Image: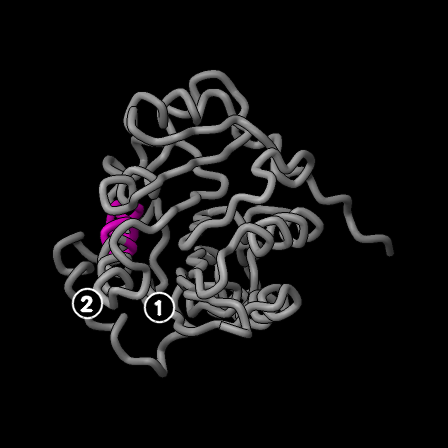
Amino acid sequence: MMNPIESDYRDSHLTPGKGESYHRQFSDQPYRSLVWEHEKRVFDRILSRDQLGKAFHHLDFACGTGRVLEYFSPRAGVSVGVDLSPPMLEVARSAIPGAEIIEADLTREDILGDRVFDLITAFRFFPNAQTELREEAMEVITRHLAPGGVLIFNNHKNTASLRNRLAQLASRRGFKGMSPGEVEELVSGNGLIIEEVYHFGVLPTTENRMLLPRPLLRRIEFALSRPGFLRNFGQTLIYLCQHKES
């Protein structure tokens, strides 16, 4: 039987008004706001290493409404966000007037030329994108990563997570995303190595149905995010990568 044709993730955020409704989810939606809190804690840990220097150049690939870009913009010497969705970028431009925000699809027309960046971020992109788009995007990202530079991206749909495993055991349909093995293959195939992996969301909670009150869930999940042996059970994995020769 033939595999079903994958939809093109490029078309997923083009609806007028999509930017405003999407952006509000990270403050109004309890579980998603909890994940965002964890992501910022990971960013702080990475920046505390002083690996990037004081005036690093930052590119946020598929920046959307600028959530990640806004976090790094006051900390970077140069901040650039790239996305192909006008309604998403409308929100980003309003929120981050000091950043350079570009409407483009770098996988089809790489208008960045020979520019390179010390830090590149790509959040909520790879597990949503179809296989071909993942590969095209990682190739472009690697091209613009400076020697010694850092790539940070997430897999918020880890198919090896406890939630997905339980769904499969119960003969329910698990979510589509990426396994840790697929992420490693994508990274290594583009000459990168994974330096660190951070995890979150070990308990089988969904965005629409939280198992516990948010304050209690927060306390438990932040505790569970520390032991390394629980890494692959998290719904969200954050990867810190560099060039192999770095």
| Picture coordinates of residue 226, whole percent (x, y) | 25, 75
Q: Nearer the viewer, residue 137 or 230?
A: 137
Magenta-colored span: 31-39
| Picture coordinates of residue 56, whole percent (x, y) | 33, 51
Residue drawn at (43%, 48%) of the image: 123
Q: Residues within 10 Å of mark 1 (few under 14, many from 20)?
A: many
Residue under circle 1? 198
Q: Would you say residue 35 sits in the magenta stretch?
A: yes
Task: Tell me the SS state at disc 1.
Answer: strand
Q: In this picture, is 175 found above or below 79?
A: below
State the image quarter where residue 50 is shown.
Answer: bottom left
| Picture coordinates of residue 170, whole percent (x, y) | 51, 66
Q: Is residue 79 left or right of residue 164?
A: left
Q: Quadrant of the N terminus?
A: bottom right
User: How much space separates mark 2 and mark 1, taking CA atoms?
Assistant: 16 Å
Task: Tell me the SS state at disc 2.
Answer: helix
Residue under circle 2? 220
Residue drawn at (56%, 37%) of the image: 112
State the image quarter where residue 135 is shown.
Answer: bottom right
Q: Is residue 231 left or right of residue 30?
A: right
Q: In this picture, is 163 found above or below 61?
A: below
Q: Is residue 28 left or right of residue 204?
A: left
The image's colouring method is one colour
Residue type, label 2: Ile
Q: Nearer the viewer, residue 101 or 200?
A: 101
Q: Nearer the viewer, residue 35 or 149?
A: 149
Residue drawn at (23%, 51%) of the image: 37
Q: Is residue 48 left or right of residue 233?
A: left
The residue at the far right in this view is 1
Q: Would you say residue 203 sits in the magenta stretch?
A: no
Dominant secondary structure of the residues highlighted in magenta in the image: helix
| Picture coordinates of residue 44, whole percent (x, y) | 22, 58
